[in-house]
Image: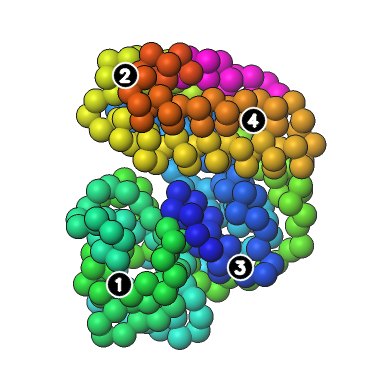
Amino acid sequence: MGSGPYCYSNSFAMLLGAQAPSTAVIEVATGGPFGMQLIGGTLVFFDAYGWDPAQGFDRALAAIGWTSTVSKGGDAETALARLAAAVRQGPVWVGPVEMGHLRHQPEMNGPIGADHYVVALDVDDERVLVHDPHGYPYAEVPVGDFMTAWRAETISYGDPYTMRTGFAKVADVKDADAIRSIIPAAIDWLSMCDEVQMPPGSLGNGAAAERVAELVEAGAGDGLREHLMYFAIRVGARRLSDTADCLLLAGYDEAAGVAAEQARLVGSLQYPMVTKDFPAAADTLRRLAPTYDRLRAALV
């Protein structure tokens, strides 16, 4: 199963197999869609302020009725031996890894600071066999490249050599109930009430949208335009569209309408960012800014 921006959700779905909920439910259950963040005044994501994927994994699995065993850390030799032993029992969820070291992906020649997740299938002395949800089934990654990627030195969160095994279903949970169970966390994310350590200059939700509008009007330099048009917009719009569907399923009709509006606004940024119509993009971001308070109010 594959979609680069939904790498961890697709990797989870591959591990859970026929009993997996949709990747939309997995993604929304992490809590990621509920907010917007500008990290350190330069890096923007359409996800919750102070959130990173690792914070949502256990919550998502609990919401859908699954558990897994996490192992991480140690040196490269020990980690590789651990992975080799694990794949003999079945596929292994691996990540974060640095995507830039996965050289089976065209144009990847070194670290780019992009987190990624894969499913490991087999290990030998020369290569690690993976299902890469970026669209590369049965990709062979040289062991050296894989271990460098898995060390994740250029990823801003998580621990080196993290993997999950022993996936077990512990409860039958309907999709609607899974989404209802994470609503309190969603409200907390939108309220920005968690005491998270963020770099100076970081902003969340409406303030983030307003500041990004200013940066876009100024020319979206220092890689901002590229980050938005290659990654942040497309994953943000899809995540919010899935959020709208999930909220509707769970009976939060008003909140679903706000999330759908957010999805359309974020998705509509793609064309003006590609064509450098920065005034149009800035106007859209300013229309997005008040929707975060409205989504929180609708969920409350």
Pick whichever of labels 2 and 1 is earlier in the sequence: 1
Q: CA distance from mark 4 to mark 3?
A: 28 Å
- The residue pinned by badge 2 equals 215
Residue 128 makes an appearance in the image: yes
Type of the residue with mark 4: Ala
Residue 45 picture location, percent across and down = 42, 34
Range shown magenta: 285-299
Q: Are marks 4 and 1 in contact (CB under 8 Å)?
A: no
- The residue pinned by badge 3 equals 16
Q: CA distance from mark 4 to mark 1?
A: 39 Å
- The residue pinned by badge 4 equals 260
Label for residue 293? none
Type of the residue with mark 3: Leu
Q: Is residue 117 magenta?
A: no
Pick whichever of labels 4 and 3 is earlier in the sequence: 3
Q: Residues within 10 Å of mark 1 (few under 14, many from 20)?
A: many
Q: CA distance from mark 2 to mark 3?
A: 41 Å
Quarter placement of the C terminus = top right
